C-alpha cells in the first residue's frame, strides 16, 4: 500500500499528494493525531505496563494490547460467485467456504461479513444442504453448530448474501482514505464520459464487505472468484483465469483461481473496459490493464516491470512466486496503490503521457508494490502490529531498485527524503516501529512503519553488507513462505545469515519509541595539537548503540574509521598531522536513523564537499553554509555545487540560492543561473533556475522565459509560466487562457489554472465550467479546486462568484469518495471563513456586499450538509461551522 490522498478535516485543510514524499508537515500531525495525543499523554499520567519494552497506558480503553487474531478455524478455500446490480451498487453472492478447526475442537464459528444482508447459511455435504443456526450483527456472522468439530473434520459452508458497500458510512486511514471494500464507479452511468468500473480494496480488513471470510492477515486460503459481468467488460483477479463462460443475455462469467494460499486483504478483482498490454518475465505473463486512451502509454507507465521482477528475484534468491503479475489502473481509487497478490491495483495518477513520464516516472510506486509481492504477500505481517515487515521492505524496495538501475545518486536522494519525512513526522508522534498498543489499526500506516522502517533496513544493509542482507532476505522468505511473520522472524533470519546476535539492534530500533539525537562538538586544542571530538546523545530518550563510519580528512586526504557509540557521551582525539588540522565527517555513509547536529565552519564544509563524492555530503555542505554567504568558502561551495556533476546537487544549490536577498550576491550568481536555466540537461535544475529569475525579478529574462513556457518538460514550462506571471501578469494570463485549451498536464496545468484563478477575470468562470464538465475523476477535480478557490476569493462579478461556489457544491454531490467530498467541503468552509473575516473588517456598502456573499456561501454549506451521506463528514462540517 502506498499513500496518495490525505485529508485532514481536523485542521480544516486539504493535503493531496500523488506520492508520499511531498507531504506537508501539518498533515503528519493529523495523520498521527490520535496516537500522538492518546499515546504520549497517557504514558506520563498512568501506571505503565511493560511488554517487549513497549510502554503504554493500562487505563486507556482505546489504547489496548492488540494480539494477533486467534486461529480457531482454518479456511482452506474460499470460492465466491458474484452478480452485480450496477444501479443499486450491490453484489449478490454465494460463497462456499472449506474449513476445519485450526487445532482445538469447537462447535462455534465467527466469520467477518461487513454491512451485508445474509439470506442463508447452510452446511453442504455433497447434495445435502443443512441450514445452520446463526446470528448476524452488522459485521459478523456467528454460527452455532449442533456438534463439536475436530481439527481433522472438514466442513463446507455455503452462505448466500447481498453485499451492500454503499449502505454504511466509511472509515479509513491516512494511507487508505475509505473502507467500503467494494467500489462501483459510475455504474449507474450518471456521469457521461466517465468509465464504468467495479474494483475492490481489501487492506486492512475491508474485503469482508464483499466476501464472508476470516478477514485477518494471519489466515490464508486459496480462492476462486467467479464474476458475472456484461460481456463487453474485462475482469482481473488473483491467479489465473480458469474459465470464461459463453455470453448469455449479454452477460459472461469469468472464474479466476489462485492455487496458492493468500490472506483475505490481498484478494481482489477489477472490472472495466480495459485495454490489456502484454509483457513477459521468464515466460510468465506480465500484463498492464489500462483505459483504452492510455494503451499507447502503458509500457512506459509500467516501464521496467519485468526487469524489476528479475532484480528482486535475484537479490531475494526467491524467484517471483506467483503465476503472473498484472497491474491495473482504476478510477477514484481510495489510496495510492495496493499490492493484491499477483494483481496490483493503482490509482489513476499513474495515467501519464510520455511528456509527463519524462518529468516523473512511476517507478517508485511500481517497485514498491512489486516488492510487496514478496514482502507482504509471500510472507505477511502476522498482525497489523508488525505491519512494518510489509511496508519497510516495500519502502526500501524503491531504493534497491533505484540503486541497481540508476546508481547511488538517485537512491541516495530517496533515502535522504525518506529519512527526513520520518524525522518531520517524529516531531508530532514517534511511536515504536512494532506496536502492540494502538487505538485503531489504520494508525499503523504512518511514517514510522514506512519511512523509519525503510531507513532501519538501509542502515542494517550497510552494516552487514549486500550479500548478507540478500541472504537474510532469502532465509526470511523461504522459512516463512506462505505464512505470516513478525519482526522477530526477520531478526532470526539476519542472525542465521550473519552468524551474529542482532538482538540489540532490533531491540533499539523496533521496540523503542523515539530516535537518537546525536550532538557532535569539535574543539581544536592547539596546545596539545589535537582535535577533541565529543559525541553526545543527550536529547535521546534511550542510549543507542550507533556503529558509524566516520571520515577523517587532512587537507584532501580522507581515511574512514569506525565509531561504535554506546554511551551517552564519548570523546575521540585526532592529532594534527604536519600542522594540518583534521576535519571530521561523522556518519559519512548516512546510516544514522536520527538527527545529527554539529557546528562547522564554511571552510570545514568546503573540505567535506571536496572530499566526499556523494549526494548527501554535498548537499549538507551547501545547506549548512549558504546562509554565511559573505564567507569565501561558502562562495566556493556554491560555485562548485552549481557546476556539480550531479543534477540533484545543482538543483539543491539553486533552491538555496533562491532565498538570497543581497543584490551583490544576486549579481554575482546571475550569469550562472541564466546559463543553467537555458542549457542544463536536468529539468529540476532548469526549473529551479527559472524560478530564481522570477523571484529576483529579472525582467530582462522575459523573452527567454516566454520561450521556456514551451519547454519539453511540463515542470519547466509550468515553472516558466508562473515566473512570467510575476514579470508580466497580463501576458501570462493571455497565455494561460490559451494553454488551458491545449490539454496541459502536471505543473503546466496547475500553473495555468492558478494564474486564471489569481487574475479572476469575470468571464473566466466559463473556462472553469468548461474544464469541469470534462473532468470525471475526483483526483482531477481536486487538482482544479485550488485554483477555483482562488478565483472565488478574488472575482468581482457576483454572478461569476455564485457560479464558482456552486461548482464546489456540485463537485461534492457528484463524489462517491469521501475524502474528495471532504476536500470540496473544506474548500467551501475555508471560503466562508475568509469572506466572514473580510465582512467583519469592511464598512458601508462593501460590508453589505460581502455579507451577501458570506450568506450565499453559508447557504451552499447548508446544502452540502443536507446532501452529505457520511455522518462523520456532516459532524465535521457542523463542528467547524460552529467553531
Ligand atoms: Zn506498501
Image (cartoon, rainbow, N blue to C red):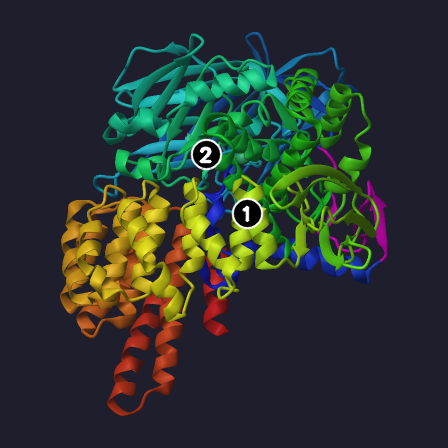
On the image, the x and y values in percent for residue 599 come to 65, 59
Q: Is residue 89 magenta?
A: no
Image location of residue 141, percent across then percent down = 61, 32
The image shows residue 131 at horizontal and vertical percentages of 60, 21
- Indicate the quadrant where residue 416 lies: top right
Count of numbered tags: 2
Position of residue 875 relative to residue 406, above or below, is below
**Residue 647 shown left or right of residue 809 in the figure:** right
> Residue at horizontal 49%, vertical 42%?
3
Cβ(mark 2) to ligand 1 < 8 Å?
no
724 and 851: which one is in front? 724
Determine whether, in the image, residue 623 is placed left or right of residue 771: right
Q: In the rendered image, which residue does mark 1 sit on?
A: 609
Which residue ends up furthest to the bottom in the rendered image? 844
Which residue is nearer to you in this view: 235 or 613? 613
The span shown in magenta is 47-68
Above or below 842: residue 15: above
Circle 2 crowding by C-alpha within 10 Å: few under 14, some 14–19, many from 20: many
Residue displayed at 53% across by 26% down: 371
In the image, which is nearer the foreground, mark 1 or mark 2? Answer: 1
Question: Is residue 781 at least partly visible in the picture?
Answer: no
Which quarter of the picture shows residue 472?
top right
Of pointers 1 and 2, the one earlier in the residue sequence: 2
Secondary structure of residue under mark 1: helix
Using the image as rendered, state which of residue 664 and residue 95 is in the foreground.
664
**Given the current orientation, which residue lies at the most extreme front position?**
578
Q: Quadrant of ligand 1?
A: top right
Q: Which residue is mark 2?
A: 365
**C-alpha span from label 1 to label 2:** 32 Å
Amino acid at each position: 500500500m502506498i499513500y496518495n490522498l490525505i485529508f485532514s478535516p481536523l485542521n480544516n485543510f486539504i493535503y493531496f499528494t500523488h506520492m508520499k514524499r511531498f507531504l506537508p508537515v501539518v498533515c503528519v500531525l493529523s495523520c498521527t493525531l490520535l496516537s500522538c495525543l492518546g499515546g504520549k499523554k497517557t504514558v506520563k499520567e498512568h501506571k505503565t505496563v511493560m511488554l517487549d519494552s513497549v510502554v503504554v497506558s493500562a487505563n486507556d480503553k482505546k489504547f489496548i494490547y492488540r494480539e494477533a487474531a486467534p486461529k480457531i478455524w482454518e479456511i482452506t478455500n474460499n470460492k465466491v460467485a458474484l452478480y452485480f446490480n450496477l444501479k443499486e451498487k450491490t453484489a449478490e453472492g454465494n460463497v462456499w467456504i472449506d474449513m476445519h478447526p485450526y487445532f482445538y475442537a469447537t462447535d462455534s464459528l465467527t466469520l467477518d461479513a461487513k454491512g451485508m444482508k445474509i439470506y442463508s447459511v447452510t452446511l453442504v455435504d455433497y447434495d445435502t444442504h443443512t441450514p445452520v443456526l446463526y446470528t448476524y450483527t452488522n459485521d459478523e456472522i456467528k454460527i452455532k453448530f449442533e456438534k463439536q468439530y475436530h481439527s481433522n473434520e472438514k466442513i463446507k459452508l455455503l452462505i448466500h448474501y447481498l453485499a451492500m458497500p454503499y449502505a454504511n458510512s466509511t472509515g479509513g486511514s491516512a494511507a487508505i482514505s475509505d473502507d467500503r471494500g467494494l467500489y462501483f464507479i459510475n455504474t449507474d452511468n450518471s456521469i457521461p464520459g466517465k468509465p464504468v468500473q467495479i474494483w475492490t480494496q481489501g487492506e486492512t480488513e475491508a474485503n469482508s464487505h464483499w466476501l464472508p471470510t476470516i478477514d485477518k492477515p494471519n489466515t490464508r486460503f486459496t480462492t476462486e472468484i467467479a464474476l458475472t459481468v456484461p460481456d463487453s467488460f474485462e475482469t482481473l483477479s488473483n491467479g489465473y483465469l480458469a474459465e470464461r463462460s459463453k455470453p448469455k443475455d449479454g452477460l459472461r462469467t469469468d472464474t479466476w483461481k489462485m492455487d496458492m494460499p493468500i490472506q483475505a486483504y490481498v484478494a481482489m478483482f477489477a472490472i472495466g473496459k480495459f485495454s490489456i498490454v502484454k509483457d513477459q518475465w521468464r515466460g510468465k505473463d506480465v500484463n498492464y490493464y489500462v483505459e483504452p486512451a492510455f494503451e499507447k502509454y502503458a509500457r512506459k507507465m509500467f516501464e521496467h516491470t519485468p526487469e524489476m521482477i528479475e532484480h528482486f528475484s535475484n537479490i531475494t534468491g526467491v524467484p517471483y512466486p506467483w503465476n503472473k503479475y498484472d497491474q491495473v489502473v482504476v478510477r477514484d481509487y481510495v489510496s495510492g496503490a495496493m499490492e493484491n497478490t499477483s494483481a496490483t491495483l493503482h490509482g489513476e495518477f499513474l495515467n501519464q503521457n510520455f511528456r509527463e513520464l519524462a518529468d516523473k516516472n512511476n517507478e517508485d510506486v511500481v517497485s514498491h508494490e512489486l516488492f510487496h509481492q514478496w514482502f507482504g504477500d509471500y510472507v505477511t505481517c502476522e498482525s497489523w502490529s508488525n505491519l512494518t515487515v510489509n511496508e519497510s521492505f516495500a519502502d526500501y524496495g524503491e531504493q534497491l531498485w533505484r540503486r541497481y538501475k540508476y546508481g547511488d545518486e538517485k537512491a541516495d536522494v530517496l533515502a535522504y527524503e525518506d529519512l527526513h519525512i520520518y524525522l518531520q513526522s517524529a516531531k508530532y508522534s514517534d511511536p515504536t516501529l512494532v506496536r502492540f498498543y494502538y487505538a485503531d489499526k489504520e494508525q499503523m500506516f504512518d511514517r514510522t512503519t514506512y519511512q523509519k522502517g525503510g531507513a532501519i533496513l538501509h542502515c542494517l544493509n550497510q552494516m552487514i553488507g549486500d550479500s548478507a542482507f540478500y541472504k537474510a532476505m532469502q532465509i526470511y522468505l523461504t522459512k516463512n513462505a506462505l505464512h505470516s511473520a513478525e519482526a522477530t522472524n526477520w531478526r532470526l533470519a539476519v542472525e542465521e545469515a550473519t552468524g551474529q546476535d542482532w538482538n540489540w539492534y532490533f531491540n533499539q530500533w523496533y521496540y523503542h519509541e523515539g530516535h537518537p539525537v546525536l550532538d557532535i562538538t569539535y574543539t581544536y586544542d592547539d596546545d596539545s595539537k589535537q582535535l577533541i571530538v565529543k559525541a553526545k546523545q543527550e536529547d535521546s530518550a534511550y542510549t543507542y548503540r550507533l556503529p558509524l563510519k566516520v571520515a577523517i580528512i587532512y587537507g584532501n586526504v580522507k581515511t574512514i574509521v569506525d565509531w561504535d557509540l554506546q554511551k551517552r557521551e564519548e570523546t575521540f582525539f585526532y592529532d594534527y598531522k604536519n600542522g594540518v588540522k583534521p576535519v571530521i565527517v561523522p556518519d559519512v555513509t548516512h546510516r544514522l536513523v536520527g538527527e545529527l547536529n554539529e557546528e562547522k565552519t564554511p571552510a570545514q564544509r568546503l573540505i567535506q564537499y571536496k572530499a566526499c563524492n556523494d549526494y548527501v555530503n554535498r548537499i549538507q555542505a551547501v545547506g549548512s553554509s549558504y546562509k554565511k554567504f559573505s564567507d569565501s568558502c561558502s562562495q566556493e561551495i556554491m560555485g562548485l555545487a552549481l557546476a556539480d556533476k550531479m543534477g540533484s546537487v545543482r538543483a539543491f544549490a539553486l533552491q538555496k540560492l533562491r532565498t538570497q536577498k543581497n543584490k551583490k550576491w544576486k549579481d554575482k550568481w546571475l550569469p550562472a543561473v541564466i546559463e543553467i536555466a537555458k542549457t542544463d540537461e536536468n529539468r529540476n535544475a532548469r526549473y529551479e533556475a527559472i524560478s530564481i529569475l522570477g523571484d529576483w525579478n529579472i525582467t530582462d529574462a522575459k523573452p527567454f522565459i516566454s520561450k521556456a513556457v514551451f519547454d519539453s518538460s511540463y515542470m519547466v514550462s509550468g515553472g516558466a509560466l508562473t515566473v512570467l506571471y510575476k514579470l508580466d501578469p497580463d501576458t501570462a494570463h493571455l497565455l494561460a487562457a490559451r494553454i488551458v485549451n491545449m490539454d496541459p498536464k502536471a505543473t503546466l496545468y496547475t500553473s495555468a489554472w492558478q494564474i486564471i484563478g489569481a487574475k479572476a477575470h469575470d468571464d473566466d468562470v466559463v473556462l472553469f465550467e468548461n474544464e469541469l464538465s470534462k473532468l470525471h475523476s475526483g483526483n482531477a477535480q481536486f487538482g482544479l479546486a485550488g485554483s477555483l478557490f482562488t478565483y472565488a476569493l478574488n472575482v468581482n462579478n457576483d454572478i461569476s462568484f455564485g457560479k464558482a461556489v456552486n461548482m464546489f457544491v456540485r463537485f461534492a454531490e457528484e463524489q462517491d469518495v469521501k475524502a474528495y467530498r471532504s476536500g470540496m467541503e473544506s474548500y467551501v468552509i475555508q471560503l466562508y471563513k475568509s469572506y466572514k473575516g473580510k465582512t467583519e473588517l469592511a464598512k458601508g456598502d462593501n460590508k453589505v456586499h460581502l455579507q451577501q456573499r458570506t450568506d450565499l456561501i453559508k447557504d451552499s454549506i447548508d446544502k452540502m450538509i443536507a446532501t452529505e451521506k457520511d455522518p462523520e463528514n456532516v459532524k465535521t462540517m457542523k463542528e467547524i461551522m460552529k467553531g
